Structure formats: structure tokens, C-alpha cells
Image (spheres, helix red, strand yellow):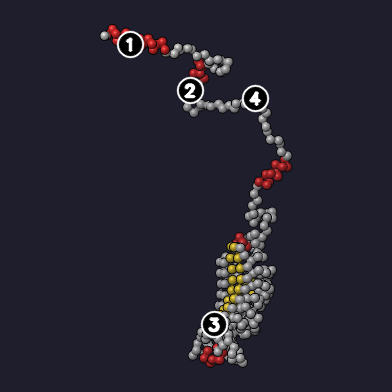
Amino acid sequence: MKTLARLVLGLVILDAAVTAPTLESINYDSETYDATLEDLDNLYNYENIPMGQSEIEIATAIPSGNRELLTPPPQPKDAEEEEEEESTPRLIDGFSPQEPEFPGVLGPHTNEDFPTCLLCTCISTTVYCDDHELDAIPPLPKNTAYFYSRFNRIKKINRNDFASLNDLRKIDLTSNLISEIDEDAFRKLPRLRELVLRDNKIRQLPELPTTLTFIDISNNRLGRKGIKQEAFKDMYDLHHLYLSDNNLEHIPLPLPENLRALHLQNNNILEMREDTFCNVKNLTYIRKALEDIRLDGNPINLSKTPQAYICLPRLPIGNLV
């Protein structure tokens, strides 16, 4: 049995040896390759190169064939300059010596050589100059519609401060030091609707445009002669008139028909006529609009002129004793 097993094992080994592939030497054509296998070890031997000093050579392969490389034609010098100029954005900073693309974007320059809309704050047609320690009205953009310059040190309003501002609708100069106003400062403003001059030192009220609907000149120094006769007569759209704390001695008459609120508290008004608010000759006359009359803080006894309130929807607020 051992002999038979050895014989079978020998036949298996012989058969495997016959069927195994024949090992042949591989020849590399030196004409096709720049280096033989024997030289590769010497070409790429990095064992003896110190760290940090190894170099990598980068080469560009030349494309095969006879194709020509296409290069863009040279451009004229003028064309290059024009293209570069067009690609450069133009900035508007308000200080460039060249004229900006949109003139007046920061408004006219002030005496401090700053544009108004850089010194103040401009939002659309509204200019805010509150609390900037200004001593004069700054030059305003021509499209200004609403101007606020409260809590400053302005002492005088000149005739040209608001000149040519045909869109100006509101002026608020609360809490300044204004003691003088030029006679033509407001008169030529065709669309002025609201004028606020409270908390100043005004002694004489100039001529005002008849377009006004709201006037507040409270806490000034108008006194007995600070308001001209019939100053509010032709203001048919005047709805609110605030004249408190001015040391006035009389109610400025006649009052506009559409007046809704009249504040005269804390003055020196001593008396009132029976035709101050009503028409004594027409007992059927009713004045519906005038609902808010303040006369408190005056040395006047309202009970002495009961006929003066017949046409009113409400009695004035004040001393009835």
C-alpha cells in the first residue's frame, strides 16, 4: 500500500511540473526607453539625499504632431486702456476733485466745508440736524421737505436760509437760542405746512405763509407786541395754534374759521371780548371745529363773558371764578 501511494504522489507531481508555464527572460527595448532596468536603481536612489534638499523636476511634454499653438492677436494700446478704464468702478465719496455722477448727493457744503448730509442725517427728503451744536441753519438740499434742527445753538434765521426750497413742508427748530428772525425768512415758502419754534427767545413773529396748518411758538418772549394784528386771519387751513408761555396780553384776532386747538396757557391775558370766538350778531352760528381752548394760567375770569362761548362745542379750560 505504501508503494502504491508513493507511485500516485509521484504521478501528480510530474503532471504539475509538465503543465506549469515556462519562465522566459523579459527583454526591454532600449530604443523605446531612455534607461534600462539596471539603471533605475541609480536614477531614483533617494536614500542618500538629506531631508529638505530634495528637488523635483517638472517638465512640460510637447504635444505630438505639427499643430500650431494659437495665440491671441496683440491688441492696440488704446483698446487696452479703454477696457481697463471700463472695468474700474467709479466711486462717489463726496470729496473727489472730479464731479460726482450724481451731483448734490451729499447736499451743499456748510461753513465747516462739510456737505450737509455728511454733517447731518439725510433720509430721502428729510434732513435731521438735531443736537449738533450748530450756530446757524446749514445749507439744505433743494429737495428738502422736512427739516429738523432741534437742540442746537442757532441765534438767528436769515432771509436766505430757506430760499428756493419750494418743497419744504415742515421746519422744527425747537430748543435753540433764536432771538431774531428776518421778515422774509418763511414768507416765500409756497408749501410750508408746519412751523415749530418752541423753546427759543423770539420777541417778534415775522410774516408767515398762509399755507400753514400747524404753528407752535410756545415758550418764547413775544409779549404784547410780538404778534402783528390779523397775523393768522388768512390762514384758512390752520388747525393748531400753540402760543403758551409767551407773556401775551391778548388773544390774537381774528382766529381762522377751521382752527381746532388754541393753546394760550400761562400768559398774561386779562380780558376777552364776547366776539372772540362767536358771532354775537348771529345767534344761530355754531363753531364746531374749535374744541380745544386752553386759557389756564392767565389772570382772566371766564365767567365774566358767558356769551363768548355760546357757539363752541366745549367751554375753554381756565379760571371760572
Residue at figure coordinates x 66%, y 62% from the top left = 108
Residue at coordinates 61% horizontally, 71% vertically from top-left?
A: 170
* Amino acid type, label 4: Gly
Give coordinates of residue 240: x percent, y percent.
Answer: 58, 78
Residue located at (54% from left, 91% from top): 306
Q: How far across and down, in percent of the image, does residue 301 sit?
A: 52, 90
Q: Considering the numbered disc 1 on the image, is that residue within a helix, a strand or a loop? A: helix
* Disc 2 element: loop
Sequence-wise first label, 1 or 2: 1
Say whether disc 4 or disc 2 marks the residue closer to the N-terminus.
2
* In this view, the mark in front (1 or 3): 1
Q: Quadrant of residue 273?
A: bottom right
Q: Which residue is mark 3?
A: 291
Please give the label number shown on residue 46: 2
Asked if one can make out residue 146 in the rendered structure from this viewpoint, the answer is yes
Q: Nearer the viewer, mark 2 or mark 3?
A: 3
Mark 4 lies on residue: 65
Return the residue at label 1. Answer: 9
Q: Mark 2 to mark 3: distance in Å?
A: 104 Å
Decide: few, some or many residues near mark 4? Use Cα within 10 Å; few <14, some 14-19, many ≥20: few
Q: Position of residue 185 (x, y in %)?
A: 66, 73
Disc nearer the start of the sequence (1/4): 1
